[in-house]
Structure formats: C-alpha cells, structure tokens
Image: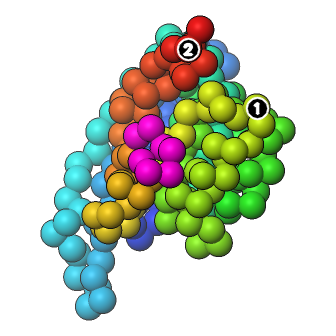
Amino acid sequence: MGWSSSSNYPIFVALATGDEGGDFRDWVSMGLFKRDSKNNISPKRRTMATLHHLKPNAAPRRRVLVVEDDLDSVHSMAMLIKMMGHEVQFAINGMAAIDIARTFRPDIIILDIGLPDFKGDHIARQLRFEPGLENTQLIAISGLPEEHLEQRALQAGCEEFYRKPIEPSVLEALLGRPTRAEKSA
C-alpha cells in the first residue's frame, strides 16, 4: 500500500487489486481534515473517501515529469502516474526540474507554480527555451490560494492550470489527451 499525507493535501491510498502480481489498479483519495491554529478541524476540508478505478495502458504511454516540492505529494503523484502505465520522473526543486527535463525529454511536465527556490513561471519560461523541449506540454498546478497564479502560469507558457490536489480521474484524462507533438504531426 502506498500513501501520502500532509497538512494541506488529502491522503491518497493505492490498493493492490486484480492480478497475481499485485499491481495497483484502484486508488482511494481520502480528504484530510485540516486543523487551524487552535487545533480545531477546519470546515474547508470535509471530503469523504473516493475510490478511483484506474485503466492502465488505456491511453498512449507518456513520459511525465512531476515538479513538486512536497515530498509526500510528489511521490503520490509519481506513483499514481506510474500506475496509469506511464513513465515518470520527479523533481523537488526548479534546478533539478530543468536538469531532468533536459535528459528525460518528457511529453508532459506537471509543474508546481509555488516552488520555494524558483517560481514555477520562471521555470516554465526557461523550459520553453530549452532545445528539444519545444513540444513538451506544461501543466501548472498550485495549492496556493492566490488568484493571479493561473494568469502568471499561462503567460509563462503553461497550457493549463489546476488547483491541487488533482483528482486521479482528471489526471488520467489529462494524460490521455494528444500531446503537442501529436497535435502538430
């Protein structure tokens, strides 16, 4: 069983079901009850558990780079993407993201806009200038409540913006769409 938890994000639990190899095929997202400064449960997090049945290999296999500074979140998302049948690598800061993107050559980069070392929009601009990454699709994510982040991400070259956490079904649909390279072919 894989899991992730943080004070700001829901818990994701992977369940082994189906084949003898114990492949993960079902994914449970369970809302965490966030506590305020007085240790009271915040009314903003009252999500119930949701079971998502994954369809591995239903979509074309993608090369995906996940850039997220929260270790629990990046591990959870990377494991989920791998369970969907894609090749995945991850980075926990902007410099690592650029280095990995240069060698891994992902089809899609899921980029946290609120990284602590470099802002995600600066990284997106840098990635747009990297040779060999012209057709890489940039998807911005953020858990920060700031309204201007979506506009900054889109102006920096990201195609889409999502608030964290991304539901597994939304992520699965996103990775199943044609890539920039497929659209231009």
Residue named by callout 1 = 132
- Relative to 149, does residue 159 appear above or below in the rendering? above
Q: Residue at x 62, y 68 (%)?
A: 118
Report if residue 77 lies within the magenta region: no
Q: Residue at x 62, y 56 (%)?
A: 123
Q: Classify residue 182 as left or right of residue 88.
A: left
| Residue 103 screen position, x and y as percent | 83, 38
Q: Is residue 3 visible?
A: no
- Relative to 39, does residue 2 appear above or below in the rendering? above
Q: Secondary structure at mark 2?
A: helix
Q: Classify residue 154 as left or right of residue 109.
A: left
The C terminus, quarter of image:
top right
Q: Which residue is more in the foreground, 66 or 49? A: 66
| Residue 78 screen position, x and y as percent | 61, 41
Where does the magenta region start and end?
154-160
The three-letter code of the residue at mark 2 reads Ser
Q: Secondary structure at mark 1?
A: loop
Q: Are marks 1 and 2 in contact (CB under 8 Å)?
A: no
Badge 2 density bin: few <14, some 14–19, many ≥20, Cα 10 Å: few
The three-letter code of the residue at mark 1 reads Gly
Badge 1 density bin: few <14, some 14–19, many ≥20, Cα 10 Å: some
Residue named by callout 2 = 184
Judged from this view, the residue extending furthest toward the bottom is 38
